[in-house]
Image: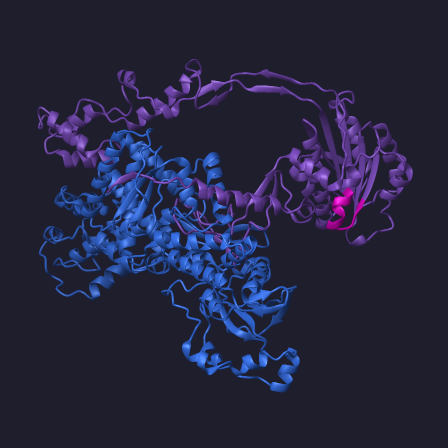
Chain colours: A purple, B blue
Amino acid sequence: MDVQYIAQRMSRRINRDVKRFREIGENSRMDLEEFIKHGQMGNDIKIPIKIVDLPEFEYDQRNKGGIGQGDAEQGDPVDADNGEEGDEEGEPGEEGGQHEYYEMDPEEFAQELDDELGLDFEEKGQKVVETSEGDFNETRRAGPDSTLDTDHLFKQAIKRHVAMFADTEYIKEMLSVRGYGVEKVWDWSRKNGINVSKSQIEELADEVDNPTKYDSPDDIEKTLRRRPPRSSYSNLKFRSDDERYRAPETVKEPQHNAVVINIRDVSGSMRQNKRELVERVFTPMDWYLQGKYDNVEFVYIAHDAQAWRVDREEFFGIRSGGGTKVSSAYELITQEVLSDYPWQSWNRFVFASGDGENTANDTEDNVIPMMRDIKANRHGYVEVQPNGGRSRRANIADELEKEFSGEDTYRVARVGNKNDVMDAIRVMLDTTDQD
Amino acid sequence: MTGPLRDPNVDESTIEKLDEAADELNELAEDLGLSPNSVNYWLVNHDEINQLAAYDGFQTRYPHWKWGMKYVERKKKDAYFGGKIFELVNHDEPSSAFLQESNSLQEQKSVIAHVEAHADFFANNKFFPDDPDAAAMLERHARIIESYYEDPSIEYEEVEEWIDAILCLENTIDELSPMEDVNNSNPDEDNKGPSAREKVDSLDISEDVKRQVFGEIEDEEEEDMAEEETDVLAFLLKHGKQFNEESERAVEYEDWQRTILEILRREAYYFAAQKMTKIMNEGWAAFWESVMMTNEGYAEADEIIDYADKQSMVLNAPGLNPYKIGKELWEYIENRRNRREVADKLLRVKGIDWRNYHNDVDFTDVMEKLEENADDSVLCEKHYSLLRRQNLGFLETIPQDELQRIDRYMFEKDRYDTVEEALQDVDYEAGWKRMREIRETHNDITFIDAFLTEEFIDKEEYFAYEFNPQNEQFEVSGVDLDSVKQKLLLQITNGGKPTIQASDKNYNNAGELLLKHQYNGIPLDMKQSEEVLKRVFNLWGRPVNLKTIDKDAEGNEQGIILRYDGESIEEEETDDVEDIRADQIDYDTKPEDWL
């Protein structure tokens, strides 16, 4: 058995392969348009790379199922990560059909979308740049001695000390009972969960003066210690693994602020296919604006005949049974949202979506005036109408277009299917004229 | 590999300690009854081990971006999740194993122990050929393929795409059979001249006319085509052509194309052994590593925690963890055999038979005697599984029917007068002996089939799960043996991939390829299959077809044939699917009321 050093460095070869992989990845990244049409909508911007995912004959994932461990009954839900085999801990020859994702941050995404759609987006707002050092709340693995987190170090050492403790004095007493040899004491200590090895017991046996001091274990005067005595704590063993060093947080003041207020009609008529189209339009817009501004906050408002705030997950998913009154959303915004985002220091974007239906006259009487009242960089309405079906009452887009024609702040788009998505985004975000 | 380089950052004494550890552990392995083949250990740094892992444990592989992808992925995992590769060993004679410089001595020892157990598995399991000469072979392959990339008369992308296409079919070999030689040049045939079909083919007329005028011409070769060919790569070598874009015709493979196909097929066969014994092999290594380290006292006082940490990190990785289930099964086999051995002896005591076994045997007494009789200086007695803390109650759990079976075939039923006498004759090594037998002859499929029992899955709490279309989520579909076994077998048969066979090289009487999916209740990922077909087209040169069965959310099955002609995919329904339905197997464990 000879232990040697690896001979030649393999770097050259692997670098060649990595380089080729990146070339392929870059060029074959699914172009954005297709991605938005086909890609998944999630919280991270992950663009699947087409070519890198070599197809194979595989089972349909959903039908494949799997096995797991745990106290379970038929029907219990399972959190299947759909993972393939567990860790490939260095075992050769294992290769599944891999999915590689190219991860983008919002800024990169915004850049891409700009290029793709030919957008020219100008941010507004004050420029305020401030960085400061905050509290010493971050921890790192290395640092100046003075910042060592001694609390943590001690706590870990103590935990270990307690876990490893075995009352050797008591064991010696056990060994002093008539008939209790190493074997018996070993057995007894295992049964009582005492953390000692057989060889330790053997060693202790050598130290016992009188192996027949007691007739039975009941005679033992000493009581069994379950925890280490105070005195032993002076011999704590520390581990370098447990060293943690405090470091200051860096706090940065935002440059530009923006709030994006998303509104969605969740009434009964907004079925799955419409919701999906909304998601396909709004998600990229969220990312885009996130990439363009330093500090963006998102407000999600659902409405049927009334309006209420929701969080992002609910926004795309929910559906109520009620009728539709679009102005309820704008009402809510005026009453409860605007005060948090004063126009002086916040850029505002208000995007609404629905299938164009509204209660009689609500658009004309309420929505339009409120849209004018609420100061914002952009007001948008996205009408989703799959398969071009339009009911007589789907008028919102028409009315808004008529009212706001020529006014750059107000944008209206219609989406019939996935192919209209990119155009809709362009309409919403483009800044052609100065504003 | 060339000689070692000295890295000034690692000192002499580390090497010495490791040398010593490797020697001692190798000796210990042999004392425990193992017979590892020889292993060369290499100390490498962090980056190197990632590279080696990307290359499947070898230093040289043919150029391809997939290695780059694997490497990048490993590095990411490393950085974000601390995915340390603890061990990396390849199957060769001698094997090479790689130790990370940054591992502590404790970690190195457990890696070495693990590696020695792997080396024993490679040496003894019948699916691993004795002298694979793997490193040399892979290096040869690398050089050959490199030369094609560098050949100015061959376009770089063409080579890469050719390899890409073949990689999609990497698993379509006959893993259970040794690799057959494919000889395309049959000297007898050459003398016969072109076959009837070839003569007709060479006439420049349309297929329709050919068929009308000449009817169906039988090809002499067609008689050979009676059976389905599981080794699709071999089938391609024999009958495949490439599609020439300019002439829009199928033409013979170039030499370089044929060679690459041969190379990749050969490599697939080399790695097949490891793929189909993964659970056994990893379980085996984890089992013996544990014996060697914890029980043997190699771990000193404060190393136990280090060691336990590492074991639990590895063993609790998410997804189907072959280490975990493998180790559990081996431990179960060990215990069961030992339990049976004791029962065998006790049933030969006067007055004890299978009926009164559980009533009349004092198991506490038996355990005490087993312990007393155990001689610590004998390894199998020192580590006797029935005496380990977590197994203390196992002896008495022997099921009634097992007792009956032992009893039924027993001669010499009254050999012993007392329990004490009987226990003197217990073979403490029974468990390990049985384990050694099994590791020689089994692969994962037969392993699971034979040793996964009701008792095991109950104790270890295994369950099967499926996607419930009604509730749109994954749910437990069953905790019974059949369900669990089926789902497990599905994951490990053919590497968890469906079995595709080549069935016809003259499908539609137009030289089209027909592939058949051996349907076992689980449908294919159709989208991916279509993508594969597109690439198979490049390897066949003519339209390619795939016959399979699709299943909808309600569980209704429909036979379909997918066809790709170079331009588009067509789907045709068919009811003639008896030839692809694997009769007794249905790996779908969804309960009726879910559909």
* Image quadrant in which you'd find residue A112: top right
Magenta segment, prevailing SS (helix, strand or loop): helix
Q: Quadrant of residue B528?
A: bottom right
Residue A421 covered by magenta stretch: yes
Measured from the top left, where is residue A106 in percent x and y?
A: 65, 34
B415 within the magenta span: no
- Where is residue B59 shown, x and y percent of the image? 39, 46
Pinpoint residue B335: horizontal percent, then vertical percent.
26, 51
Q: Nearer the viewer, residue B152 or B429?
A: B152
Q: Quadrant location of the C terminus of chain A? A: top right
The foreground one among B428 and A95 is A95
Please tell me whether residue A159 is drawn above or below residue B6 in the rendered image.
above
| Image: magenta residue range | A414-424
Point 50% across, 52% down: residue: B150
Indicate left or right for A32 with A235 as reference: right
Where A125 sits versus B200, above or below?
above
Q: Nearer the viewer, residue B399 or B233?
A: B233
